[in-house]
Image: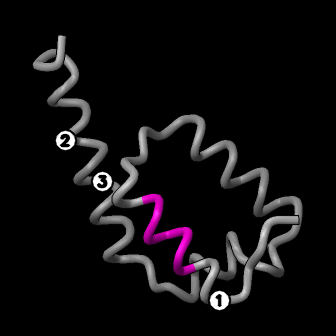
Amino acid sequence: MFLGILPDFFIVLIAAAVLLALTPESVIVRLLGKGSGLAGIAAAAIVGSIALIPGFVAFPLAAILHQSGWAPP
C-alpha cells in the first residue's frame, strides 16, 4: 500500500518544496498573515484540506507566519 501512494507523495513533496522556494516570504505573509483576515484563514483551510502537506513543510511555514506577528484569532 505504501508503494502505491509513494509516487503521489513525492509529487506533492516536490511541488510544495518548489512552491516554497519560489514564493518570497513576504508574499506568504501577505496572503496568510495578520492582515489577511478571514479570507486568509479560509484560503489556508481550503488549500490545507486539499493538499497533502508534510509536517516538515507545514511547521516551518507556521514559524514564518508566527515570526511575522501573525497569531490565530
Q: Residue at the location (69% across, 46% down)?
A: 45
Tell me which numbered mark, 3 or 1, is placed earlier along the sequence: 3
Gap in angstroms between the C-alphas marked 2 and 1: 30 Å
At label 2, the amino acid type is Phe
Magenta residues, as a range? 58-64
- Callout 2: SS: helix
Q: Residue at the location (22% across, 22% down)?
A: 5
Q: Which numbered mark, 3 or 1, is in the foreground of this view?
A: 1
* Residue 10 coordinates in the image, percent (x, y): 19, 41
The residue identified by callout 1 is 68
- Callout 3: SS: helix
Gap in angstroms between the C-alphas marked 3 and 2: 8 Å
The residue identified by callout 2 is 10
- Colour scheme in the image? one colour
Residues at circles 3 and 2 in contact by the CB criterion of under 8 Å: no
Find residue 35 and report its image quarter: bottom right
Position of residue 49 in the picture relative to residue 51 (left or right):
right
At label 3, the amino acid type is Ala
At label 1, the amino acid type is Ser
Q: Residue at the location (29% across, 63% down)?
A: 17
The one of 17 and 66 positioned closer to us in this rendering:
66
Residues at circles 3 and 1 in contact by the CB criterion of under 8 Å: no
- Callout 1: SS: loop
The one of 27 and 64 positioned closer to us in this rendering:
64
Find residue 44 and report its image quarter: bottom right
* Residue 57 coordinates in the image, percent (x, y): 38, 60
Gap in angstroms between the C-alphas marked 3 and 1: 24 Å
The circle on residue 31 is none
The residue identified by callout 3 is 15
